[in-house]
Amino acid sequence: MRIRVVIAYLAALAAALALFARTPVGASSTQWWSVFLIGMGIYGPQMLIGLCGAELVGRANVGASEGLMGLVAYLGAAMAGLPLANLVKRCGWEVFFRVLIPCALIPVALLAGLVRAPAHSEKRNPGA
């Protein structure tokens, strides 16, 4: 169930990014709401993805699972800094949003395969 919630957050993030990219300069209320929705769309998956990974593996493998997801998160954070700043500097904000929106949707495609994956506890107790 948590995977579906993460997918919904990521879809909302992509929609909020698209809204923000198309918001005119003078529409401060729309800008405010879209930034609020972007923040919500980022925080939801960040909060839940660790729980998703922990429930899919056994108790003995939770540490490795969290470590691997942490590595991916740190690599993502590293890629969000200087490379995206250089992209904005060289190509402008329009290209930035054309890159960032697919970056919010790629995890949806990757997580879609896990939607029906049973939790580790369900694997051991199929009747529960």
Image: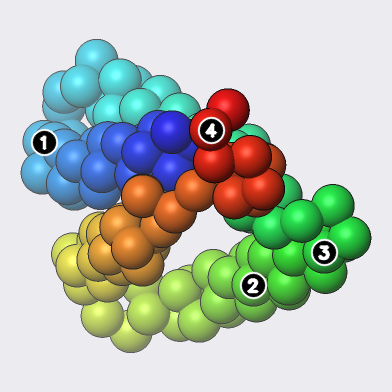
Q: On the image, numbered disc 2 is attached to which residue? A: 72
Looking at this rendering, what residue extends furthest in the top direction?
A: 29
Residue topped by disc 3: 61
Q: Nearer the viewer, mark 3 or mark 4?
A: 4
Separation of residues labelled 4 and 2 (CA atoms): 35 Å
> The N terminus lies in which quarter of the figure?
top left
**Of 112 and 97, the residue lying toward us:** 112
Residues at marks 3 and 4 touching, judged by CB atoms closer than 8 Å:
no
Q: Residue at x 50, y 48 (%)?
A: 118
Answer yes or no: is residue 99 visible. yes
Looking at the rendered structure, the kind of residue marked 2 is: Val
Q: Regarding mark 3 in the picture, which secondary structure is present there?
A: helix
Do the CB atoms of the residues marked 4 and 2 lie less than 8 Å apart?
no
Distance from the alpha carbon under mark 3 to that under mark 4: 23 Å
Q: Which residue is mark 1?
A: 24
Q: In x, y percent, where is residue 42?
A: 49, 41
Distance from disc 3 to disc 2, alpha carbons, whole Å, reads 17 Å
Look at label 1 and name its amino acid: Pro
Quarter holding residue 97: bottom left
SS at mark 4?
A: loop
Find out whether the residues at labels 1 and 3 contact each other: C-beta distance under 8 Å: no
**Which label lies toward us, 1 or 4?**
4
Of circles 4 and 2, which is in front? 4
Left-right relation of 44 to 25: right
- Residue that label 4 marks: 127
Instruction: Estimate how packed mark 3 is, as few (under 14), some (14 to 19) or many (20 or more) residues with alpha carbons within 10 Å.
Output: few
Q: Amino acid at mark 3?
A: Asn
Secondary structure type for disc 2: helix
Tell me if residue 64 comes above or below residue 35 in the rendering. Answer: below
Q: Amino acid at mark 4?
A: Gly
Which scheme is used to colour this image of the protein? rainbow
